[in-house]
Amino acid sequence: MTSPRRNRLGAVAARPAAAPLASLVAGAAGAAYLWGTDPHQPGHWLPRCPFNFLTGLLCPACGATRMVYDLMHGDLPAAFHDNALLLLASPFPLYLYARWVTEGLRGRTYRPTLTKRAQAAVLGVAVTWAVVRNAV
């Protein structure tokens, strides 16, 4: 038998705003930590890219943490240097994230989907970017 408290927690977690709000809190905590931690310098507690660790190559997202740090500190040229493609592509996922949060706060569920063609395009660009940045 399920306790009444567990039912209340489940009801709260099932609300459309629960996941967006939880992600905002987690993102704010991560941003607060990153603000005072320079990922360009060694000796900090930030995870290393598993792909880079295993292969020594840069994945399509390598440099994202440094890029966000540079953006938070207003250094756009350094952010572009860290990961140009991710910086240029970031408005689209940021729009989707903002829409997810907004719809959740309005009590609606938002689940965007990509067509097979769009998925193939994203994968193709990511693979091409990884090859190009490792070849240079």
Image (cartoon, helix red, strand yellow):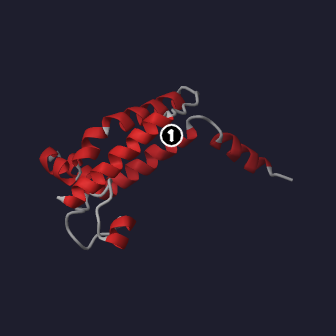
When the figure is inspected, residue 134 is found, relative to residue 4, above or below; the finding is below
Residue 73 visible within the image: no
Quarter of the image for residue 135 reads bottom left
Please tell me which residue is depicted at 35% across the width and 34% down the height of the picture: 92
Q: Residue furthest right?
A: 1
Q: Position of residue 46 (x, y in %)?
A: 34, 65
Relative placement, left or right, of 12 versus 23 is right
Please tell me which residue is depicted at 45% across the width and 40% down the height of the picture: 119
Q: Position of residue 116 (x, y in %)?
A: 50, 36
When the figure is inspected, residue 104 is found, relative to residue 125, above or below; the finding is above
Please tell me which residue is depicted at 15% across the width and 51% down the height of the picture: 78
In the image, 80 versus 1, the foreground residue is 80
When the figure is inspected, residue 111 is found, relative to residue 87, above or below; the finding is above
The amino acid pointed to by label 1 is Pro
Residue 117 visible within the image: yes
Q: Residue furthest left?
A: 77
Q: Characterize the local packing of mark 1: few (<14), some (14-19) or many (20 or more) Cα atoms within 10 angstroms.
A: many
In the image, 47 versus 131, the foreground residue is 131
Relative placement, left or right, of 91 versus 98 is left
- The quadrant of the image that shows the C terminus is bottom left
Q: Name the residue carrying label 1.
A: 20
